[in-house]
Amino acid sequence: MDLAQQLVAWRRDFHAHPELGFCEYRTAARVCDVLAAVPGCKLRVGREVMTESARMGAPAPEDAAVARAEAIAAGANPKWVDAMGDGLTGVVAEWTFPRPGPTLAFRVDMDALPVTESVATTHAPARSGFISGRPGRMHACGHDGHTSIGLGLAQLVARRGAKWGGRLRIIFQPAEEGCAGAASMVEAGVVKDVDYFVAGHLGTAADETGLVSCGSTGFLATTKLDVTLRGVAAHAGMKPHEGRNALLAAATLTLQLHAITRHGAGDSRVNVGQLIAGSGRNIIADHAELKLEVRGSNTEINEFMTAEARRIIAATAAMHDVQATVKVVGAAQGAKCDAALKQIVAGAARSLPPTKRVVDSLEMPGSEDASCFMNAVQARGGQATYLLIGSRLTAGHHHPTFDFDEASLLHGVELYAAIADRILTVP
Amino acid sequence: MDLAQQLVAWRRDFHAHPELGFCEYRTAARVCDVLAAVPGCKLRVGREVMTESARMGAPAPEDAAVARAEAIAAGANPKWVDAMGDGLTGVVAEWTFPRPGPTLAFRVDMDALPVTESVATTHAPARSGFISGRPGRMHACGHDGHTSIGLGLAQLVARRGAKWGGRLRIIFQPAEEGCAGAASMVEAGVVKDVDYFVAGHLGTAADETGLVSCGSTGFLATTKLDVTLRGVAAHAGMKPHEGRNALLAAATLTLQLHAITRHGAGDSRVNVGQLIAGSGRNIIADHAELKLEVRGSNTEINEFMTAEARRIIAATAAMHDVQATVKVVGAAQGAKCDAALKQIVAGAARSLPPTKRVVDSLEMPGSEDASCFMNAVQARGGQATYLLIGSRLTAGHHHPTFDFDEASLLHGVELYAAIADRILTVP
Amino acid sequence: MDLAQQLVAWRRDFHAHPELGFCEYRTAARVCDVLAAVPGCKLRVGREVMTESARMGAPAPEDAAVARAEAIAAGANPKWVDAMGDGLTGVVAEWTFPRPGPTLAFRVDMDALPVTESVATTHAPARSGFISGRPGRMHACGHDGHTSIGLGLAQLVARRGAKWGGRLRIIFQPAEEGCAGAASMVEAGVVKDVDYFVAGHLGTAADETGLVSCGSTGFLATTKLDVTLRGVAAHAGMKPHEGRNALLAAATLTLQLHAITRHGAGDSRVNVGQLIAGSGRNIIADHAELKLEVRGSNTEINEFMTAEARRIIAATAAMHDVQATVKVVGAAQGAKCDAALKQIVAGAARSLPPTKRVVDSLEMPGSEDASCFMNAVQARGGQATYLLIGSRLTAGHHHPTFDFDEASLLHGVELYAAIADRILTVP
Amino acid sequence: MDLAQQLVAWRRDFHAHPELGFCEYRTAARVCDVLAAVPGCKLRVGREVMTESARMGAPAPEDAAVARAEAIAAGANPKWVDAMGDGLTGVVAEWTFPRPGPTLAFRVDMDALPVTESVATTHAPARSGFISGRPGRMHACGHDGHTSIGLGLAQLVARRGAKWGGRLRIIFQPAEEGCAGAASMVEAGVVKDVDYFVAGHLGTAADETGLVSCGSTGFLATTKLDVTLRGVAAHAGMKPHEGRNALLAAATLTLQLHAITRHGAGDSRVNVGQLIAGSGRNIIADHAELKLEVRGSNTEINEFMTAEARRIIAATAAMHDVQATVKVVGAAQGAKCDAALKQIVAGAARSLPPTKRVVDSLEMPGSEDASCFMNAVQARGGQATYLLIGSRLTAGHHHPTFDFDEASLLHGVELYAAIADRILTVP
């Protein structure tokens, strides 16, 4: 099996076994198994690369236990799973080269989404038999590809690394969705000595196989909130007036959040993505849980949105005489890519046959947990970029029929290796 | 153990093992075990007493399987459980007396509610160790008491029935909550020959131990609807405008339903009791499920509410460009109690020492699946009433700290037996 | 012109010149002109019969000035208009008979509604040329008929009063709509010595010419609120986030008020009847004015509704960061009719040829400012009733095509005179 | 009085007499009086420069009549007022120079806003006695200054025009607010032969006296809609269920419009700026009028917003069973400024002593009716720009305390004259 075939095989295996943030036990264990076989690769997992308290929104111990059992049942190596405890699913691979040189880190992400994958025969994973085997979860954003690219890069180190100096690190991050996982790895120091940081994404605005965008603009700052509303139950037929309706409060809150005014200075976003409320049809609902997020094209706008959301949550609680609790479970800042590093990426991209077109930057109108790494690296004087590996998409990210062009996997691996060549090669 | 103690024991056992509508496997199996030991009692269960297609809102086969397994694990006799198939948990006990006479039927109900019971030490079930062992379910309406009264009445037949003629039937109904179960028993013919029909309730407006209300007024007609909204998922940061937000539609629907105008001609009600929508925080939600009900103090008002709800559901779908499907999963009509039968109840009540006060009727400002039996019996010329067995309550029905006075159990059994004496005794 | 013709003429004149509450200058002046010509009638107007500070929601001085000018332009006698100041449009006529006897008071109301009358040729006032000459105002509740009946009764005193003792008082009340005017007349003492109080209404539930209902049940207690919201204006294109949107707050408030839960113990109502907000399309609205009311079938329920409304108003202001001010501009309590007085009405009604049917009471499912007089009279030991003079209606009250059967006018006058006969006649 | 003093005098006179769009009778008449005294100036007004049917949202004839009367009472020359008919308040001044050359047009706007001006003594117009004499109207956007600059430029033609060839045109536009007036002037051909078109604004993003922005970016495309909802009135106490509540529908519509999802591809806006609904507090409201607008940072986004708004309006009507009518009363497209013309502006700006700083472009995050002229000029090959004349502001545009630095008036006139010098000077 050549590398191109291997990349597709990994990707399809990950695709068939999607795992949500902080529960990527099987994915991370498979990553460890592959990396453990790579000469010179030093492996760290779990608590070694994640600070537990800095995670945003970790799973409950019982959910983590269920996820571990599921992972092991699906073939995960228990050795690695055990090392990952309750939601410590990060992995870091590192090569230290004999000659001195800079430290270069690549970040890939491993988590899937709570989306139910399409079974349409026009959808390649369904047609070709690597559709998600887990209803309600799907690799609908391409992280299965990212993880595979990380593994592919590791395969090339032996061949290419002979002329390299310094250090190469590949960070396999959990819980990128929701911007929940990066902070715990930053806190654990995984980029504290990094001179060059590269993260990337398949597709998004680079919806064209062969295109490389050396950087990205338009990172949205974001705040992720979990809101719980507690009311008082009552019989809906006999004594509705004695109830305090948490479900009606949640509906009010949802509508009012979506009606937060647009900001005149730039983009904003708001989404209540999940709402679970009430128990019985004839009972005034006494509880509601909402998962929501706001975003802004800069930190100021995101803070405006967050402040509006917090005021509306408090007022909704007062309006319906219920109790509200608010928990921040994720946050990302804005981010900027360094011009010098983008230039290096451009040179690397142009050197590769599969590259059809190179652009300086494209809009990345979403939030990225990579911003947490980028800001940390730049704060201590390093450079960072967030590149895009072009890939023809079948549908937008997070859509049930999302799929990318698997030819982009090898392109991605070669691009990362060429970047490493340019940064680490010792003359 | 005398009957009073036995009643309390049964009640506490049922209370500790609450089961939701159509899944009362353990309760119904225990009822069968007890009745099977009663001389002269003919027992029918499952398909013999329920028409499957006439149920409103039966459980999915997999949920029924889980419930069966749980019931057996909790000691249910598998023989009976097997006979109850997927959600056919009704039981009918019958005695045919040698001498001719009328047919008298009592109906008791067995289902619990999706309420999480209070663990406060001021709450007797918590203090005395018979609190619900099933988080999220609770006998918060007194049906555990009703089932026990049905069993207690069966014990008295041997002693009292010597002078009786005709037929006595005790109907153990599943799924009273939601007005979902009665129709299937009526359709199966369990009241097709009934001359006198008596159903009753502990407490409600009769919040005073020793009080008997011979009938009830104010039955609310009701319609129970399940609504599903289907939208289109999209990335909430990158392409929110490509989504069709089913969660936001559900919030709109909830608010608009609760804002349906009051009716000038009488009482109405509306409640969205459960709402589950969305999957991930950063995904525009593509689905939402709502469980709701409307009510009216007469059929016309209920039909007004139902028509308003249907129009609002359709318009909400149009407003948010989502697809709505609506399923009727329960319905009750208004009901009236017969004066002659209420007189019989009054005489019976006055003859009993525990009776402190007798009233003709009290308001029953809720909906009752018994109305389905009552209307069927009256339609063929029989008489029906819905009496109330007074009991001091600790909190309103459906409340986490609901509890009744267990002394009312024996009062209820004696009242039912005294009614049977008056109707069935052959001179 | 006989009395029947005179009644129709008065009614049509009033109908063509509808005036809103506290601005009934022309109507009241015409009443005074007619009464001034009645022998033995002592007339009091304005400040003599109304306590200014006890009015709820009086017109602004400049609006009163406009209304006075309009009234005089439409033929009102300036002498009376001047005596009525700013919104003191009440009139009381009184006859004191030589022989001792009880004090009997009738109350009629004079104000019209802010409804635009139908111009359909099927609508009698349009067809017969007495349609409202004032767009946006209409006698859509029959008060034009009530005022005429009051004048008609005054005509009969000379003929019938020879045998009467005690005192007869006819109270011409302004601002019945909105329950705004009665309190100021009660406060001024116009019923402080009344032994028998009779108010009545054409039509409503007595939608049948010839029917007399001796009393009414179902009076709704009510609270009328004016709410002002103050926000901050901003350019809706450039800096929407700097605005504080009072219009959006008003929309939220409206929806949330209409979604106040039904009360399990009886009827409730809520209506935002008027909303004026904002200035320019491209300006975030900085102000909004709402006129609203809540009701309850008893005082407790009305208080529940009022408390809910107040909490929702405060929370809406917090939610949208605007300032709210709330003003109570009207209120009515529940009321009960005295059985003995209803008996007198029944006897009177049965004695009249036009009476086709007499009932003890009908539902009056609205609020009535008469309740204020009734409670005051009953508090000092007097009797009160609120009767209904049956009249075939063309449409519901407050509807643009509302009209009643003018034959009911003479019936009403005769009924009132017959009641006076029974109460005041000295043996 | 020198020109600087004259500009301030004009501006303060206009400021004290604000007039809304299509009713700028006094302003336009004063403009005509001034221009009529300028040698060589050819004047056209009313129907000569506006196509009646192409106006968006003209005033009702009776409102126009009131405005005319008010203007004349405030000193407007009846000759001009008469020529302006019902809402044809545009004026065009033109100079044709003997030698051939290009046609250059400047556009200034004359209308005020429905804002109530602040009476705070910190607000210069209040302190210095030129506050709006018309409650509810205010020059809160600087158009009073723009009109003055147009008049000032006319004064300089005699002095500067000796060396000019071609044609100079100054367009005094009515109804810029709401993007309602330009289309009718374009349709009447006032820019059909224009080679260079310049419009400008005081302040906005150029909140700094001495700053000149040669062009603008970020024009928002917009659609202005008037929505009328018709329901059915009913008595809110007696028969609320017979009503069809247009006010509640309007509240729903407002909330749902403000909750239209953000667009992922750029800025959007939505505002319901005015809402008038209902008549009486105790009547279910049978009508509502809303003035609203949507915007988008490009035409596609504006069309998305417009389509969403239209769907929501239709669905709201269905939801509340009311009738909706929608009228487009204004619209603007996106616009781009020509680089060559911006260069000319830059040169002119740099030549002037009051200029402190020159920038190529600033964000103009609003909609501008000038876009209509700009697109028309560019469509036939001409060049256009929208420049900003920097001015220190006291508050945001449309705010009750908005004011600009009057020193910018002379700067503006000199800038316009310098641009004309550069474009029209014949060698």
Image (tube, coloured by chain):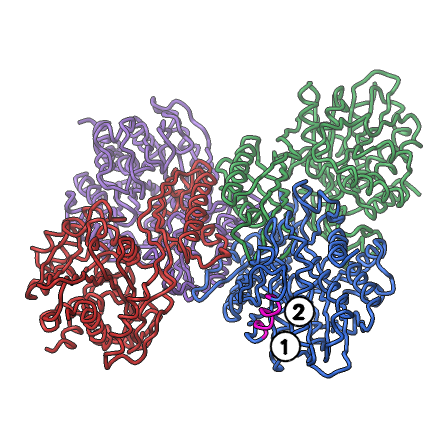
Chain colours: A blue, B green, C purple, D red
Q: Which mark is residue A418?
A: 2
Q: Nearer the viewer, residue A23 or B96?
A: A23
Instruction: State the quadrant of the N terminus of chain D.
Output: bottom left
User: Does residue A344 show up magenta in the picture?
Assistant: yes
Q: Is residue B421 above or below residue D301?
A: above
Q: Where residue A182 sits: x, y (%)?
A: 68, 69
Q: Where residue D72 sits: x, y (%)?
A: 11, 57
Between discs 2 and 1, the one toward the N terminus: 1
Left or right placement of residue C274 versus residue A183 in this view: left
Q: Where residue A292 sits: x, y (%)?
A: 60, 59
Left or right placement of residue C321 versus residue B112 in this view: left
Picture residue at 30% right of the left edge, 81% below the top: D356
Q: Which mark is residue A376?
A: 1
Picture residue at 23% right of the left edge, 62% below the top: D196
Instruction: Count neighbours of disc 1 (C-alpha within 10 A) and say few if under 14, some if 14 to 19, many if 20 or more.
Output: many
Q: Chain of mark 2?
A: A
